[in-house]
Amino acid sequence: MANDFSYKDKKVITIGIVRDLTGLSERQIRYYEERKLIFPERSSGGSRKYSFADVELLVEIANKIEDGVQTHEIRKEMLRAQKKQNQDDLRRKMIQGQLNAQFGLRKGPSS
Amino acid sequence: MANDFSYKDKKVITIGIVRDLTGLSERQIRYYEERKLIFPERSSGGSRKYSFADVELLVEIANKIEDGVQTHEIRKEMLRAQKKQNQDDLRRKMIQGQLNAQFGLRKGPSS
DNA sequence: CGTGTAAGGAATTCTGACACG
DNA sequence: CGTGTAAGGAATTCTGACACG
């Protein structure tokens, strides 16, 4: 993969830290999850774990709500963006597949 | 600065997550702090907070201890490395200062 | 020296619910 | 609809100490 994910997407931040990082209340953070806007992982004991990407997303969500956008609308926006992203990914993958078929390019850096 | 620190150095990971990430026991993690090998921040309530960089450092420390190196030795190694880093930084800064004095280069990207 | 453990307490997090509007 | 709050319980973390070696 071109863009290997690392720190930004690892879910390792507990809700109290997220609260401090974003300035949101825990109530707000949990509510946005209830509305399917954010998807933390869980520790073995059941505690929520967020990534830095989640933290940034939470701030964006809170900003939109302040602007009067409802959670349902925000969710639809996100689904649209996600869908477009998937299409773009697929298109890129197909073009790559064509190139490989035509010219027999190998994938990874060969040793 | 050339290398703006971001996710890797933010202290946002609690000790339980660090335990899961490294496979070390909480006892080990706290002990390495007692021996001044690692420096977590504290939340308002007193809980330790680590960065991804800390997590990586902890693994390195544990590996050295497994190799029979004592914490005191590891600490000395780290201080040497730190000192060298500071010297390099200073040297770079001085050279930059000379260039600025000679040619009057401005620092940041001007608007 | 480095690590495990039991102990007691304090801080953290969880869920479901009532409230307001 | 989005958020605050009190409630009760469970999981998490903290410190200081004893143990082994």
Image (cartoon, coloured by chain):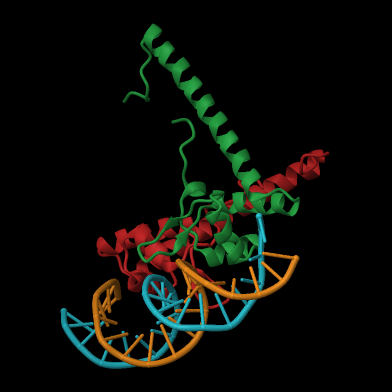
Chain colours: A green, B red, C orange, D cyan
B75 lies above or below C1? above
Q: Residue at x 41, y 16 (%)?
A: A97
Q: Position of residue A6 (x, y in %)?
A: 46, 45
Q: Could you say which is closer to the camera, residue C18 or residue A65?
A: C18
Q: Position of residue B77 (x, y in %)?
A: 41, 62
Whether residue B38 is visible: no
Please identify the residue farthest to the top as the structure is shown: A102
A104 lies above or below A77? above
Q: Position of residue B43 (x, y in %)?
A: 55, 72
Q: Could you say which is closer to the camera, residue B52 or residue A65?
A: A65
Q: Residue at x 76, y 43 (%)?
A: B108
A42 lies above or below D5? above
Q: Position of residue B28 (x, y in %)?
A: 33, 70
Q: Could you say which is closer to the camera, residue A6 or residue C1?
A: A6
Does residue B71 appear to the left or right of A19 in the view shown? left
Whether residue A86 is visible: yes
Q: Residue at x 58, y 54 (%)?
A: A55
Q: How many marks?
A: 0
A104 lies above or below B102? above
Q: Work out which quarter of the rendered image holds the C terminus of chain B and state it.
A: top right
Q: Could you say which is closer to the camera, residue A56 or residue A46?
A: A46
Q: Residue at x 77, y 44 (%)?
A: B107
